[in-house]
Amino acid sequence: MRLDRAQVGFVGRLVSLMGDDWLTVRLRELGFVPGASIELQSRLVSGEPLVIRVGSARYALRRVEANCLEVEAS
Amino acid sequence: MTQCGHEEKNLSQHDSSKKCVLVVGAPNSGKSTLYTNLTGAQSRTVNYPGSTVDTSVGVSRARFGESLTFVDTPGTYSLEPKTLEEEVTHKVLFCEFSIPVSRVLLVVVDATQMARHLLLVRQLQSGGYFPVVALTMNDLLKRDGFEIDTQKLSKLIHAPVLPVDGLRGKGLNELVQALRKEKDRVEGRLDRGAVKFLALSARETENSLNESVIFAKESMSKGVQLRGGPDSRTSAWDRWLLHPIYGIFFFVLVMSFIFTSIFWLAAPLMEVIDGGFAWLAGQVLSLGGDALWADLLANGIISSLGAVLIFLPQVAILFLFIIILESTGYLARAASLADKPLSFIGLNGRSFVPLLSAYACAIPAMLAARTIPSKKERFLTLLIVPLMSCSARLPVYALLLAFLFKDRPAWQPGLALAALYFGSLFVGACVSWVAKHFLEKSGRSFFMMELPMYRRPHWPSIFRTVFNRTSAYVVNAGPIIFLFAGLMWAATTFPNYEEKDQSARLSSSYAATAGKWIEPIMEPMGGDWRTGASLIAAFAAREVFVSSLAITMHVTDSGEDEGGLQRGLLAQMKEATTPSGALLFTTSSVIGLMLFILIALQCMATFGVAKREFGGWKLASVQLVAFNFLAYGVAVAVVQGLRALGVS
């Protein structure tokens, strides 16, 4: 499942990154690597940005950015 | 992002003692705080040739022994640049640079984000650099019962690791010693060959990060798992502050509080400054009598100095709030909340900070736009930044509103001022929305905003930053304002400076002669040569409008210095008439003036910075011309419209 489809409160692991390089390269550098633990903490008004915890870091990602993240529930 | 091509440079041709230590680190790593504490206040900014972003160079404080020169670089997540700021760091590291740099550099790593930040250390190592790691935010880890074994970590990553407390200055002595030791070791023996940028493949980045995660886990004491992270407090806060409803409510509350406090907190200070300068000018005049020097000193120098300093409280207060929001971690949340609405007009959540800063001054705001990764979004932000109501407009609004709402309850001008502020936001949104259709489509827009942990504000460092930014502002803007106010005095005093009758002296002055030329242009918006000349002088800086109007109306001379310059000016404005005998300042002409001030780009300093930030004259000139024509058009339309409706 792509992370942008997940429910708030989702906890799981990152399986892989998909999408354009210019998005996935930066996502990797920010700590979004396969195997990382991921939590969808909240969505702001109108559904984006999404507040996502990865490892010990926390980011606000747009829907298209979260769509690059293939995740599975743990 | 453009790079220099070969991404390789030789570091061995310079004398080792002259080589500077680069300070590199991710955003929010505590790098700037550490740099400020290492170097003290004395640092100068250096431009990387051909780029627009400043780097700062500073010498270590005397108490750290033999001096060591540091170069602060903009925060970067990796060595592959994605924004203008990151590009500068990349270039300083791997392209020719005017300052000789050492192969040993200081990398700032946030202990709570270690795995991710170690990626940068490893990228630097593979490029041929020898990093010394300063580990910050240890207090946050300790608070949650974690501790890092720095020796173990040092062995794992093959680099010296030193825990520091950037805010309180702990561990800095040891850090400087370690840097010196490493510098002697590296530069003494193996300073051969070049440093070279090696781009990592996706797989390499993943491997490097996964390895860093393991390193981070192994060096954490207590064997506590990293999963979940030591940040439960931040999560709890975010549940409220980023809530779809309460979050917005809090955001509006914070912003309203900031904007109202710009007024009620600053007002008493401004009155003191205004009254003080008026009193001083009055004293000089009574001392010097009719002498030209007294006139120059009182009406030229002292009044214009007052014009520079009067808006200082507001600038400082807005800076103070922005810095508090930044250092506590809320600013990143505010930007996230603003991302969606801003995207409708072609902007990015990262445009929020520049736009907010623009309410203090457009110049730092334009510099803040460098963190916006997409070129189109950055250009749109740069475009509308000068439309936000900067503090220099405030003295003008204050004067005109005081005129318009004389003897009315205070909430009325307050409400009108709020309307002007929202008006500027509205005009900015319209301009951005229109302009986005003209700019080339670029799909490469991303947000990915890091939300740092909430921290308690550390007041000494906050006040130091406010002081630095405010004084930098005075140093940059002050001389121009001062110069133009002086010129304005000369233009209204000469050539018939010996004429005793003031109105005769003024009406035969150079300013009056020049003003008569533009009077036909001013007439449709209800002005005359005095407002016209003041508007032209305001191109130096908007607040000059007030001092120029005071000079063209000869306010301090009237002896009404008891209630400050403003009261004297208001009295003069009430009686001023056009050549045809009609009143000059009427409801419609004052509204027209305010709208002109709201839209026009009357600030040469902003134009200069815009040229640099847009990367050329073309867009900056388009912006300058377009906004001024738009301002004139709107002002004329409103004045004529109001008059047609019977408003005087």
Image (cartoon, coloured by chain):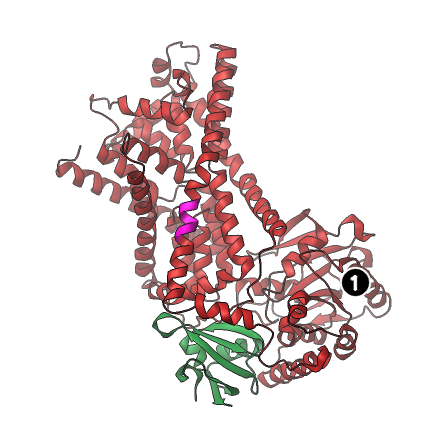
Chain colours: A green, B red
Query: Looking at this view, is B498 or B156 the one in front?
Result: B156
Q: Quadrant of residue B179?
A: bottom right
Secondary structure beneath disc 1? helix
Instruction: Report if residue B388 is visible in the image.
Output: yes
Q: Amino acid at mark 1?
A: Leu
Query: Is residue B583 or residue B399 the one in the foreground?
Result: B399
Residue B108 visible in rendering: no
For disc 1, the marked residue is B179
Quarter where residue B227 is shown: bottom right
Q: Is residue B142 left or right of residue A31?
A: right
| Few, some or many residues within 10 Å of mark 1 (<14, 14–19, 20+) | many
Q: Is residue B95 left or right of residue B525?
A: right
Q: Which residues are magenta?
A: B256-261
Residue B264 is left or right of residue B167, and the answer is: left
Q: Does residue B394 lie above or below B324 as drawn?
A: above
Residue drawn 48% across and 35% down?
A: B269
Q: Position of residue B114 (x, y in %)?
A: 65, 74
